[in-house]
Amino acid sequence: MKKEWVLSIGVVAITLAVAIGLIRWYAPQLLGIPVDLQAVRVSKEIPPFFENAFHMEDLESRKFLLQDPYTNVRAKPFYTDFSGLGLGPHDLLGFRNRSIPYIADVIAIGDSQTYGNNTVLAANWPSQLQSLLADRQPVVYSMATGAWGAVQYLNVYTYATAFQPRVVVIAFYSGNDADESVTLAYSNDHWASLRPDTRLNLSDKPRFPGFPVPPSEHWQAHFEGGMHLTFTPSLRLVSNDTAYATVRAGYDIIEKVAQSITQLAGDAGIHVVLTVIPTKELVYAERVHREGIKSSAEYAKLVSLERANIARLAQSFKRLTNSEYVDLVEPLQKAATTNEPLYPPEPDGHPMEAGNRVIAAAIAPVIRKHLIPPPRGLVGVANTSNSVIPFLATAEGLWLFATKELAVSNGWNPDQIRFVLPRDIAALPQLGVIDVVNQKKFGPRAVKAPGPVGQ
């Protein structure tokens, strides 16, 4: 009996020791061990955060685009805008912004057309969009990278939701998105679910003229008023010649990505704006026709095919819920009737400041409908204890009333408090705590033009 007792006690002791060891390793918080004293294994499950965020190989690299296993390429973090090339600056994530916001009202996702090649940061269309919506004081954050396509847009959208945006703009580009999308989806098994036809042969593609396109394949148009532009239709046919199965599959992938994003966004309460940025060639097609300029056969073929491809996408996008489609072809073609340069005269197909302005102006009215005015007056956020924290929202920022009684003493009626979501006031500067009675400074008359806010 004594041996059995000893054996039983030993088994229990060993079991407890193993259990405590497992808890200490996997759930130390259950033992009351402070977070800063808990050891975390370096593993695939929990990678060392700062080593990844400040990846020294990325920071020390001299390359503008870096390799990535999911997106193929991504932009170098902390790239400066001192190059004079119309590139940068990049934030820590490699996106073209001067900082990473805590909350973003609008997120723009796209490729180099959205990144803004050929412009300084303040002149690309996401920045001009923020200026056009200045009365709403939105935070607009760009998550665009050159050489991306629809597959990368889907990938980065999943991270965009962390910024709790009200609106996400997905700007496809008819100049190369179809080709880049089909190439990534069929070359990387991570994206196998996007493949419309598993039997597709990637070698069955339109002829690639090379990049940069050789001068022998340029077509130059001389317009009235002395303006001339160089076009590269053979390069843009690579993503528009639907006689090839790969091009048709590329547009299938674009449609599937748009459908996936709008469905995910609907579940998260995010509104999606879908648009297609046309090529430089299509933008000037109407003017070429109006002025009777005889174009090359490739240019005419491209214009016809691209117009049909964009029409197909527009029809598909308009059927999706929780989203709106914005046409950019018509406003850009209208702007192209003047001699204000929308694009450089060289073969480069990225719009300059004026072209970006047209894009921003077309998108802004649609986004405005989904942005609320900045909060003014007495606002409240319910906390976890079901009590209300009263804030005073002014044009300068946000004050916190120390108590509800102080809000009343300063002339506010607590029954008229306007409830807002935490994200509605998260970006407002914190001005301090109100612990005195000063109706001139903190009363209703001190707040100008209170507007409707929140939900």
Image (cartoon, grey):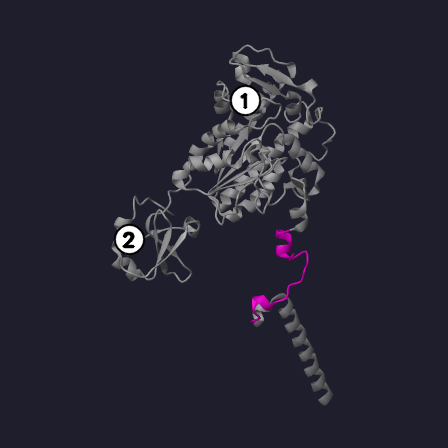
Q: Nearer the viewer, residue 105 or 250?
A: 105
Give the residues in magenta.
32-54
Residue 7 placement (x, y as % from top left): 72, 83
Residue 315 placement (x, y as % from top left): 53, 28
Q: Residue 305 falls in which quadrant of the image? A: top right
Q: Are marks 2 and 1 in contact (CB under 8 Å)?
A: no
Q: Residue 279 falls in which quadrant of the image? A: top right
Left or right of 328 in this view: 242: right
* Residue where numbered disc 1 is placed: 283
Q: Nearer the viewer, residue 150 or 96?
A: 96
What secondary structure is marked by label 2? helix
Q: CA distance from mark 2 to mark 1?
A: 54 Å
* Residue where numbered disc 2 is placed: 441
* Three-letter amino acid code of the residue under disc 2: Lys
First along the sequence among labels 2 and 1 = 1
Left or right of 232 in this view: 385: left
* Three-letter amino acid code of the residue under disc 1: Val
Residue 152 is tagged as none
Q: Residue at x 52, y 16 (%)?
A: 287
Residue 415 placement (x, y as % from top left): 28, 55
Q: Callout 1 environment at 10 Å: few (<14), some (14 to 19), or many (20+)?
A: many
Residue 96 in sight: yes
What secondary structure is marked by label 1? helix
Q: Nearer the viewer, residue 393 or 259?
A: 393
Residue 405 placement (x, y as % from top left): 28, 62
Magenta segment, principal secondary structure?
loop
Total count of labels = 2
Residue 327 in sight: no
| Above or below, comparing residue 359 to residue 223 in the picture | below
